[in-house]
Image (cartoon, coloured by chain):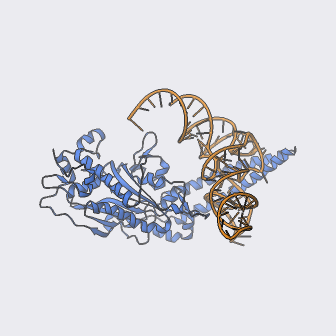
Chain colours: A blue, B orange
Amino acid sequence: MFDLSRIRKEPVAFDAAMARRGQEPVAEGILALDKDRRLILTELQEAQARRNEISREIGKAKGAGENADDLIAEMARLKADIQKTEEQERALGAELQDLLSGLPNLPLADVPDGENEDDNRIVHLQGEKPAFDFDPKEHFDLGEALGLMDFERAAKMSGSRFVVLSGGLARLERALGQFMLDLHISEHGYTEMAVPSLVKSPALYGTGQLPKFAGDLFKTEAGHWLIPTAEVPLTNFHADEILAEESLPRRYTALTPCYRAEAGSAGKDTRGMIRQHQFTKVELVSIVAPEQSIDELERLTSAAEEVLKRLGLHYRRVELCVGDLGFSASRTYDLEVWLPGQDRYREISSCSYCGDFQTRRMNMRCRKKGEKITRFPHSLNGSGLATGRTLVAVMENYQQADGSITVPEALEPYMGGLAVIEAR
RNA sequence: GGAGGGGUGGCAGAGUGGUCGAAUGCACCGGUCUUGAAAACCGGCGUGGGUUUGCGCCCACCGCGGGUUCGAAUCCCGCCCCCUCCGCCA
């Protein structure tokens, strides 16, 4: 969501930035609509002022026992007028709102140009690809051979894109989640949160999934939506609030299930755990003062990277080009972990700087002590990490020739003495 | 799910048809007094929007949305949320 005064001030720059994201020019149309609306609004408010005035006069006249018929007649006319103008104003306002709420966030100026993920820029690499003296397998072959990863039975109950983990693998995924949460709360200053997995529409509007991406989400008969990421409840936690600026930054983390309809990804990643309708993820959300937000993206991304480092996983950080940016993001770093079984890097975290795009949508503001003006804090979010995909990465990188999986050292405290996951 | 009660400014809490954006208290901010602080006293103190060079003027908002009325925080209807009791339940 954008500040109209910003578009008013720099319509050309606005359209130019939108054009980088492949958007048609909209500034002119928006400004014309806004101008019309303000004209009508002024008209409406003048009529309302007159109405209030007459109302007072009627009160006075009646109090004095005088006749007020003329005034009441004028009021009747005015009332019809107000109703009509009100409808016009509402229609224009709704049109404007629709237009604005469908626009994606603007990329920062130095985000690289590009169409799609092929144009993303590699920022740095960490670690090295592990060497194998055998052909490394993909995680689903390993998991099924171990008898601890069952897609067939999951499909029987739930359809495609679900999995049942058991034994050591179920525990390994749980260990990953606990490990990540503990790391973020004890070393990165995040506050652990336990949040709802079901939310109502305004929350999804706030973070930007609605109105445009309803098709990617699951909805219940009672009208709730299943969260596609904990970014939604964590960021909306302070929706409609005015935060004391001294209380910023606020850093929240949560381990939640995430649900995605994966509409439009038929045929993509159909095997294995890479793309599921349900997965768990540790999410990081930061709410910060506008001046701190660029630095915070580095901080947040580093926090996510630390998980991969401690697990001894080789990965790279890439910066998304404008064409690959999500709807609400101004800059995004993806962390891509090396998967030897797949012989390629796969996204395991996505860390985004959203500026005031989301906080405007959810009307979250902040204010310095003693000051009158409020402003919009900036929001950031990132996976720290997706535990399902991290499980995949651990399996493929720590596999042995016999198909067993060595447990990474960092997870030992969470595995109850289990050092190797093997078929029993 | 059933019955009842309730949602007012940062908090507490008045207000049940006519200058009510809303008494009062607390909290907070500024000032006087004081060596300093406290107390006391004085003043200020919601949000969003329109308009104006500016002072300012105006509009909307008392959970949300409709309605009645010349006029609604106040009356009526629907929805949401909270509390109490009952039922059910991890």
Q: Is residue A223 above or below residue A9?
A: above
Q: Is residue A339 visible from the viewing direction of this image?
A: yes
Q: Is residue A273 visible from the viewing direction of this image?
A: no
Query: A219 or A302: which is nearer to us?
Result: A302
Query: A262 or A254: which is nearer to us?
Result: A254
What residue is rendered at 44% in x and 64% in y?
Answer: A23
Quarter of the C terminus of chain A within the rendering: top left
Query: A414 or B22: which is nearer to us?
Result: A414
The spot of residue A114 in percent (x, y) is 36, 68
Please tell me how many numbered marks the rendered image carries.
Answer: 0
What residue is rendered at 23% in x and 42% in y?
Answer: A152
User: In which quarter of the view is residue A155 placed?
Assistant: top left
Q: Is residue A378 above or below residue A262?
A: below
User: In which quarter of the view is residue B6 placed?
Assistant: top right
- A204 horizontally vs A264: left or right: right
The spot of residue A366 in percent (x, y) is 54, 61
Q: Is residue A200 above or below residue A190?
A: above
What residue is rendered at 44% in x and 53% in y?
Answer: A234
The spot of residue A15 in percent (x, y) is 49, 68
- A270 horizontally vs A5: left or right: left
